[in-house]
Image (cartoon, grey):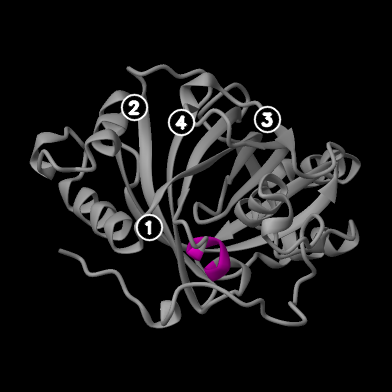
Amino acid sequence: MAIEIFSRKELKYLITRCQYDELVERIGPAMRNDKNGVDGKYSVTSLYFDNAEKGIYFETKNKLKYRQKLRLRVYDDADLNSMAFFEVKQKHKKVVNKRRMLLQLAEAYRYLDEDGQAGLEHYKTSNSQVMKEIDYFRTFYRLRPEMVVSYSRHALHGIHDSELRITFDFDLRCRKEDLHIENGPYGEYFIDQNLVVLEVKVDHSVPLWLARILQELQCEQRSASKFCTSMELLNGDILPQAGYFEPKLLEEPLTGGIENGSDHELVYI
């Protein structure tokens, strides 16, 4: 069964495909391909949510100490009968928490179309508690479907370190004209196709051997938000334009966001 509630740290890097090839070769003896997909490779297509004020975007862009996102996600080829992940991704003091549930994609769309008015007990999910939290979050922030982000992923796990997970994301695209994620991964590229988003995911700290390899290959750590970069591309002059992914440190916080958003905590009903 998929893990539905977990916490970890995520370090992001922006690397070239050449660096990717070298890195995979160097870490090969200590890593294994994810059991999903073919040789750990699969596609990810996610529907992201925001409100009319773009509050979730500004929470992320301003790097509030406590920020969160809502997304509905499928893997590889999917249809309305496929299982989807509906999840809240929260970040607090550099620690990422995810609370997610499984449900049929058609059931997720029914919940959104009905705005949950039928009563949450009428939707078939793997975790009714997480369903309540998602509904509270969506209602509190007045969230609505905003855009689709998709990419190809190569995922690996540590052979001797079960806490270590590494993912490489390629061909990152976004769209807002078609919000049906069962229609697959397509849209406008929002970073150069020669670049790869690397994420190192650990419970505590990056192993020394991996840190040394990343340093030797000159992998540059970046604050790489797929969500923000896609929003900026799709919304043109409405939002600040910052290029692809930002340096590790922001020079100035941007204006916007939800009032008192940094202090808001989800109420677990």
Q: CA distance from mark 4 to mark 3?
A: 16 Å
Three-letter amino acid code at the position of disc 3: Gly
**Residue marked by disc 2:** 105
Asked whether 173 falls inside the magenta stretch, the response is no
Pair 2/4: label in front: 2
Q: CA distance from mark 3 to mark 1?
A: 30 Å
Q: Secondary structure at mark 4?
A: strand
Q: Label 3, on which residue?
A: 187
65 and 27: which one is in front?
65
Above or below 236: residue 212: below
- Front position among marks 4 and 1: 4
Q: Nearer the viewer, residue 88 or 156?
A: 88
Q: Does the CB distance between marks 2 and 4 fall below 8 Å?
A: yes
For label 1, the residue is 6
Question: Mark 4 and mark 1: span between their CA atoms?
Answer: 19 Å
Amino acid type, label 2: Leu
Q: Kindly identify which residue carries mark 4.
A: 74
Q: Residues within 10 Å of mark 4 (few under 14, many from 20)?
A: many
Question: N-terminal of the two: label 1 or label 2?
Answer: 1
* Picture layout, residue 109 above or below residue 86: above
Q: Which residues are magenta?
A: 55-59
Quarter of the image with the C terminus is bottom left
Query: Which is closer to the viewer, label 4 or label 3?
Result: 3
Amino acid found under the numbered disc labelled 1? Phe
**Comes first in the chain, label 4 or label 3:** 4
Mark 2 or mark 4: name the one nearer the start of the chain. Answer: 4
The residue at 19%/43% (across/down) is: 116
